[in-house]
Structure formats: structure tokens, C-alpha cells
Image (tube, rainbow, N blue to C red):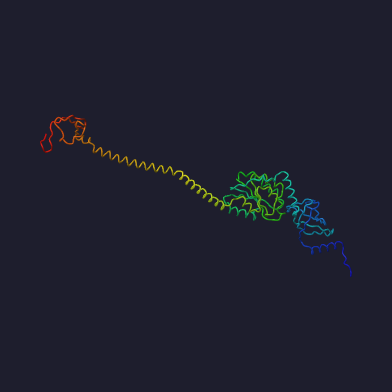
Amino acid sequence: MELPAYSVQELNHSIGVLLERGFAPRFLVDGAVLKPVLKKGHLWFTLTDGDASITAVAWASTLKRLSYRPDDGDGVRVVGKLNFWAARASISVQVLDLRPSLTTVMRRFESVRQTLEAEDLLNPALKRPLPAQPRCIALLTSVPSSALADLLRTAAQRWPACSLRVVPIPVQGDVERKICAVFDQLQEHWERLGVEAVVLARGGGSREDLSVFDGEQLARCLLRCPVPVVSGIGHEDDITIADLVADWRAATPTAAIVALLPDRQEQLRLLEQRGQHWRQSLRLRLQKLREQLQPERQQQQRRALLHQSLERRRWRLHGQGQLITALSPKRLLRRGYCLLKDSKGAMVRSGSHLNHGDDLWAQLSDGVLQLQVESWHADGSGGN
């Protein structure tokens, strides 16, 4: 069998065609970045897993779109395709997208955490209490996003009296400086806007996607925030540096609003319970006052009864006095009558026992007359 014959150019071209037909147009590859170098706007580096290595390049046009720029030794996950240069028969990985690996993310997380701990900035004593019934809060999250929709819906259900200031921020990639810039701008307007707390939120994603919230500068920005910060980033199991420095860490964006805003239904129940308690307290107090006033009321009733009895007696005496006055002899004396009395002062009701010469006294209305009996004549007779 005759062996095929190639020129160098033909051989390299055939290899290129073979690779193009037999290899996936795009693929994922994990490895560590070695000796990254920027040449003419292109990023060149070696990608290795410790047992093998391959050259990789991110062209300048791609590099502008990347949100992450690796350092030497960083673990990365590359979305790429094979580049084969037929002239030199060299192969490299052309980077289409580049993200840090979980190992790199956690190494950065641990480094920042240790730095902040060394300065005692993660001390629980630094945590500020959340406002009980905030009138205005700022929501820092991506707009539009499902996280924002959950925040707005939950806030409307729980405490619609609270005003919401929606502040858009990027939440993906190398955007730490942009988020810090938003905090710096808002710091000048907290008081004018009336903001009493901040919610920093991002919906679910891989731990690598949440690495933007592991930055040291963002952590210091949150610590400088003049109002309490509630973090609601990712899922319940995801913990970022922002979660550690926030005044309150919630598992999700929805949980952040739940932690910050009271439940109006629960508040209504509490108000009703307090109203019942106050009404019961007032009833008990009034009952106690009634019991304390009972003896005095009874005494007042006794005084009232005594007064009524005295009043009746007074009117009875008054009537008797009028009767006495009407029957008084003086009344008759004023009408021209007189009262006769003998020498002993006894009333003379009949002249039959009087004798000639007896002394009598006649009581008139204005004085007394002394009289002496001359004679006595009985009614209808001419006796002495």
C-alpha cells in the first residue's frame, strides 16, 4: 500500500480539517491560569491542571466583554473553542467567556474575611437594630429582575405604608466599583430621601456568580452605610462577605423584606389584642373604683334619706305651726275678744262661781285690764 504524501502546508491543513470536523465547536475546560500577559490588547496565558497545559488567548474584542480578569494562579472555567494555526501547526484555546472557579471564589472570600476579622469589623456588636416600622427603604438590586418583583410584591403584602426607593445596580461580573459608587452617591441623599434601611439583593445563581459580593471595598462600603443594611443574596446556603458585614443577613431577597417590614395582619391582631387588654383593664379599674366608692355612696344615700326625713319633719312642723297660729288665742284677741283670768290665774270659762267683788284680769291684744265683779247675769236670766 502506497503511503500518502503531504507537503508541510498540506499536512497542517489536513490536521486542521480533522480537528474542525472531529472536535466540538465550543466546550468548557477547568484549570488554573499561569503567567497571564497582556499583548497588544490580547490576554495570553497558560491553562493547566497540574498534569498538562495548553496555551489560551482572549482576543481584545472578547476581553472587553469579560467581567472577570484572572490573576496568576487563579482557578477558572473557560468557555472556549480550539484555534489551530496551520502555518505553525500550533493549537490554543480561544477564550469566549471566562469565570473564576469555585476554588478561586472561596479563596478570595476567605482572604477578605480574615482581613476584616483582623480589624474586628465582623464583630456582632457592630450590628445595628432594624427599624420597627420603617417609612422608607431603598432596594438595591438588578432592574428588571425576579428578585425585584419578589421584593415589591412582598412589601405590598406586608406593609404597604412603607415607601420603596428602587436603586438599580449591576449584580453580575466585576462590578464591585459600580455598586460602591451607587452607595457613595446615595450616602449624600439618605436624609433628604428619608431612607431608614437598605436591602441589598440578588436572586439565585452559582456561588461563582455571587463572588461580586465578596469584595473588600464593597464590605467597607456597607460598613460605612449610615442606615442598617439587610442582605438577601442568592440562596439560603450561599454566604458572601456582604452577608457577614450586613446588619441582618436574610437567606433570600424575599426573606430580606420579611425581616425588615412588619406583617400588617399580625400588627392588626396585636392592636386588637392590646385593645381588648386595655378595655379589660379599664373595666377592672372601674369595678375597683366602684367597690371603693360603695361605702361613700351608701353614706350619701343615708344622708339623703336623713335629709328627706328631716325635710318631711320640717314641713310637718311648719304645718303644725301654721295650725297653732290659726288656733292661737292671740288671733282671737286681735279680733276683739279677751281672756278672763281669776286672781289665781285660772281661766274664767263661766261666771257661775264668781262672787261680788272678785278681782279679774282681762287679757286684751295689747295689754291687761284689772276688773272687779259687780254682778253676774246668766244667759237668758237675771241672776246676780
The one nearer the camera, 74 or 145, is 74
373 left or right, relative to 166: left
Against 145, is 5 above or below? below
Name the outermost residue toward the right: 2
Quarter of the figure with the C terminus: top left
The one nearer the camera, 71 or 330, is 330
261 left or right, relative to 1: left
The one nearer the camera, 324 or 30, is 324
Query: Picture coordinates of residue 77 (x, y %)?
Result: 76, 56
Query: Picture coordinates of residue 88 (x, y %)?
Result: 85, 58
Query: Picture coordinates of residue 85 (x, y %)?
Result: 82, 59
369 left or right, relative to 214: left
Quarter of the figure with the N terminus: bottom right
Q: Number of marks in the image?
A: 0
54 left or right, relative to 348: right
Name the outermost residue toward the left: 382
Name the outermost residue toward the bottom: 1
The one nearer the camera, 133 or 351, is 351
